[in-house]
């Protein structure tokens, strides 16, 4: 069977495997795009498959929305309740989160859209993915020295910085969660809130990318049962990964993942010569 997306995706098992990779690595700070690229290379896919990647992201997007459903409802309530009086938004706890998400989304969107064509060319390039893995490892290792914060939110410049870090993470191999959580920890946000804000800030960017690509995939008949099964797997695995990550961030153990990423980067680059 073939999915109309890539002739290399020839079995349900391959899609489910990519779903597991996506579910684990979307939230764990090791770069889901980088791991999906490595997985596709190992499965013999030599052409970038943005549709497969984004559809699998749909599963983890749903997992994020379900995991943070209470907070999201509070944010939506404060946001829409302040439409007639915008200044009141900053006087409410969830409203401040809405403000941070909106501000961070601006540089993320600008960077993401401006780099879209380049990223598609680099999706399956080990020469790009390997150094990006190393960059992620460096970000994670740096959190060992970050101050133990007590803050629960960030100011406008902090939100823009987080948005820039998230935008740069469009590169395959740079983890979005690693980039944003490292930034939040260095900005003095306490660990549990850094985890929560990192996930919430990422929702608009992931949702936008998913809707944009899905709008092309569905009319072209590319959203088949196999891809939906992969998305279901990425949802289930991703939901579990969120619990795991929350515990590791709270215990300030993010740097553990850098120990994994360095040999992965070396192996990824070495694959060029194999």
Image (cartoon, rainbow, N blue to C red):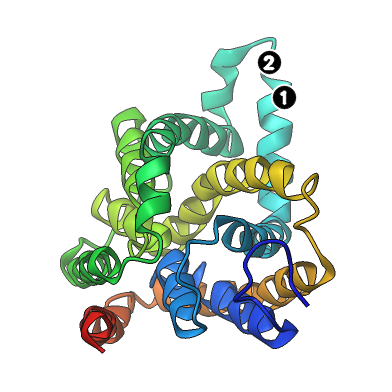
Instruction: Please tell me which residue is depicted at 46% across the width and 63% down the height of the picture.
Output: 192
Q: Secondary structure at mark 2?
A: loop
| Image coords of residue 157 (percent x, y) | 29, 31
Residue on which the image places disc 1: 80
| Image coords of residue 267 (percent x, y) | 26, 86
232 left or right, relative to 266? right
* Residue sitting nearer the eye, 125 or 106: 125
Circles 2, 1 touching at the beta carbon (< 8 Å): yes
Q: Which mark is residue 240?
A: none
**Mark 2 to mark 1: distance in Å?**
5 Å
| Image coords of residue 136 (percent x, y) | 27, 66
Screen quadrant of the C terminus: bottom left
* Residue sitting nearer the eye, 269 or 56: 269
* Residue sitting nearer the eye, 79 or 15: 15
Q: Secondary structure at mark 1?
A: helix
Q: Residue furthest right?
A: 225
Can residue 266 be seen here? The reply is yes
Instruction: Please tell me which residue is depicted at 52% across the width and 83% down the height of the picture.
Output: 43
Q: Residues within 10 Å of mark 1 (few under 14, many from 20)?
A: few
Residue on which the image places disc 2: 83
Can residue 189 be seen here? The reply is no
When asked about the image quadrant of residue 42, the answer is bottom left
Q: Residues within 10 Å of mark 2 (few under 14, many from 20)?
A: few
135 left or right, relative to 42? left
Screen quadrant of the N terminus: bottom right
Q: Where is 13 relative to 91, above or below? A: below
When asked about the image quadrant of residue 271, the answer is bottom left
- The number of callouts visible is 2
């Amino acid at each position: 069977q073939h999915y109309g997306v890539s002739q290399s995706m020839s079995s349900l098992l391959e899609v489910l495997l990519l779903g597991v990779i996506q579910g684990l690595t979307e939230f764990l700070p090791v770069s889901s795009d980088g791991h999906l690229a490595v997985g596709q290379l190992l499965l013999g896919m030599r052409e970038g498959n943005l549709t497969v990647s984004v559809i699998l992201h749909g599963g983890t997007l749903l997992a994020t929305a379900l995991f943070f459903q209470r907070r999201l409802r509070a944010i939506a309530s404060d946001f829409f309740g302040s439409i007639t009086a915008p200044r009141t938004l900053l006087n409410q706890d969830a409203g401040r989160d809405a403000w941070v998400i909106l501000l961070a989304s601006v540089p993320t969107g600008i960077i993401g859209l401006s780099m879209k064509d380049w990223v598609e060319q680099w999706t399956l390039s080990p020469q790009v993915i390997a150094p990006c893995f190393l960059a992620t490892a460096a970000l994670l290792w740096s959190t060992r020295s970050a101050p133990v914060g007590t803050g629960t939110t960030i100011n406008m410049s902090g939100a823009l910085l987080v948005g820039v870090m998230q935008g740069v993470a469009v590169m395959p191999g740079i983890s979005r969660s690693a980039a944003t959580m490292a930034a939040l920890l260095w900005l003095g946000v306490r660990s549990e809130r850094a985890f929560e804000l990192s996930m919430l800030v990422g929702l608009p960017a992931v949702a936008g990318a998913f809707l944009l690509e899905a709008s092309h995939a569905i009319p072209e008949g590319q959203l088949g049962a196999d891809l939906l099964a992969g998305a279901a797997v990425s949802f289930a695995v991703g939901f579990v990964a969120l619990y795991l990550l929350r515990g590791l961030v709270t215990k300030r153990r993010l740097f553990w993942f850098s120990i994994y990423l360095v040999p992965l980067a070396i192996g990824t680059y070495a694959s060029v010569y194999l």
